[in-house]
Amino acid sequence: MSPKVVKIPFNEWSRKRLQAGVKCATTRRFPYGKPGDRFQAAGKWWVLTDVRRIRLEEVAERYYKEEGAESPEEFIEVWKSIHPRAGWTPKRWVWIHFFQPAPTLLGVRS
């Protein structure tokens, strides 16, 4: 299948980190796309580079910086604020999406 444009919503906390260039991953309960798919956020185009299923606790331990957090504790607090009913469930399986700025073609972002 060829890459497609997908929609991945981001809260204000995440948008600020995207704009600052410190966020290159987002963790979701479901996959939002596949490597090569593109999305728009914080006024830019991004391309998914990897999407994999891992435990939520692993995101906090290993990928909090890629998520834009300064510590595992900050990532956990942000997760809990986004998911108040489910809360923090470390053993839960989630999907982490890694991304980078989309390449420019002929001076125009596609």
Image: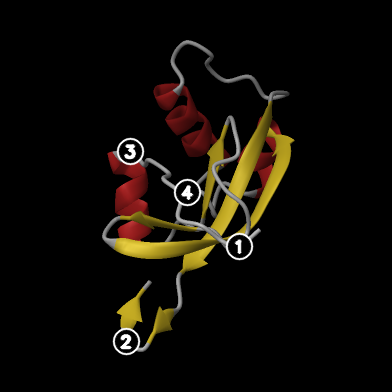
* Mark seen at residue 11: 3
Q: Amino acid at mark 3?
A: Asn
Q: Is residue 21 visible?
A: no
* Mark seen at residue 107: 2
Mark nearer the N terminus (3 vs 2)? 3
Q: Amino acid at mark 4?
A: Glu
Q: Amino acid at mark 2?
A: Gly
Measure how far apart labels 3 and 4 are at the Cα level.
17 Å
The image shows residue 73 at horizontal and vertical percentages of: 53, 34
- Classify 10 Å Cα crowding around label 1: few (below 14), some (14-19), many (20 and above): few
Is label 4 in contact with label 1 (beta carbons under 8 Å)?
no
Q: Quadrant of residue 61?
A: top right
Mark nearer the N terminus (3 vs 4)? 3
Is label 2 in contact with label 4 (beta carbons under 8 Å)?
no
Is label 1 in contact with label 3 (beta carbons under 8 Å)?
no
Residue holding disc 4: 70
**Quarter of the rendering occupied by the C terminus:** bottom left
The image shows residue 99 at horizontal and vertical percentages of: 53, 60
Vertical side of 81 occupied by 64: above or below: below
The image shows residue 91 at horizontal and vertical percentages of: 73, 23
* Mark seen at residue 2: 1
Measure how far apart labels 1 and 2 are at the Cα level.
22 Å
- Classify 10 Å Cα crowding around label 2: few (below 14), some (14-19), many (20 and above): few
Mark nearer the N terminus (1 vs 2)? 1
Between circles 3 and 2, the one closer to the viewer is: 2
Residue at the bottom extreme, as displayed: 106
Between circles 1 and 3, the one closer to the viewer is: 1
